[in-house]
Image (spheres, rainbow, N blue to C red):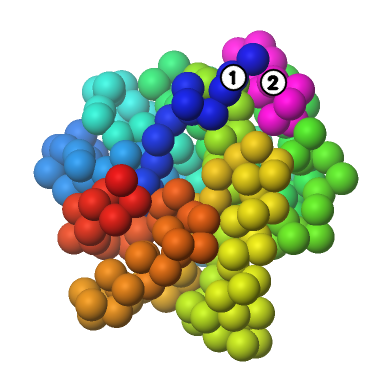
Amino acid sequence: MTVQNQLPRIRSIIRFTLPKFFDPETYIWNRFSSADAILVDIRKRDDISNGEWRRDRLYEALDKAPYKPRIYVEVTSRRKHPDVWLRDIATCRHPQLHGFLMNLKDGDVLRDVEKIVQRGKLVEDRSRALTKGVSPAFKDASVLVDIEKKSIPYVIFKYHNFGARREGGWNHLNDLANKANAANVMALGWRSRPIRRYRELEREMITLKELGFAGVVLHDSDQIELANKIFS
């Protein structure tokens, strides 16, 4: 059975789209090598190829792995574009990809992913329980499915305005972190709109740590060092 101290440590996970006309290996090493993990966004956009080039760039990057950061992929929603989701999730067959981001609104897709990926049982039963009978607290959350570790080590809670009353304030975020820990997973915070002011960002990260969060999803590589320092 996987125990918490064997799970990947993620203080900083940075989300981005690989560039279309720049070497992805160089891009990752130059900008994101100090992050604990990277989340490569290959979701469908309004383009004619259904994002095929995004998958191609991801494969090109994976073929040149390993990198220092763990690599996860953010795929198209199965609810919105099931055919594209199938092609996106097939990238998880690559042995250098550590896992994928699963939106709990899409339902329990693990069995379907196992059939596509063909890498055996994706996660242990203890972790799988999180995706069944989803708690109301997690209904808008996403989880990181780590194929290498066969676990769901992190649940990601997205928020728009930190501490805002309409989102339940800090007590709500603290409650989410506590519920994550009770479910044997760790909580990551994801602010939908990036903060550019360093001091404000620093205060927010410190507060998130005090509320029980283990790390954050980042928009900017310049914030990696700060996140790693605060959540250490």
Would you call the spot at circle 1 few (<14 residues within 10 Å), some (14-19), or many (20 or more)? Answer: some
At label 2, which amino acid type do we have? Glu
- Figure quadrant of residue 100: top right
Q: Which residues are magenta?
A: 117-128
Q: Camera-side residue: 163 or 96? A: 163
Residue 157 spot, x, y in % from top left = 58, 60
Residue 121 spot, x, y in % from top left = 69, 15
Circle 2 is placed at which residue position? 124
Which of disc 1 and disc 2 is earlier in sequence?
A: 1
Residue 64 belongs to the span the image colors magenta: no
**Left or right of residue 76: residue 61:** left
Residue found 42% across the figure and 75% down from its top: 193
Residue 202 badge:
none
SS label for mark 1: loop
Residue 41 in view here: no
Residue 170 spot, x, y in % from top left = 56, 75
Residue found 55% across the figure and 85% down from its top: 164
On screen, residue 230 above or below 131: below
Label pair 2/1, CB-CB below 8 angstroms: yes
Would you call the spot at circle 2 few (<14 residues within 10 Å), some (14-19), or many (20 or more)? Answer: some
Circle 1 is placed at which residue position? 2
Viewport quadrant of the N terminus? top right
SS label for mark 2: loop
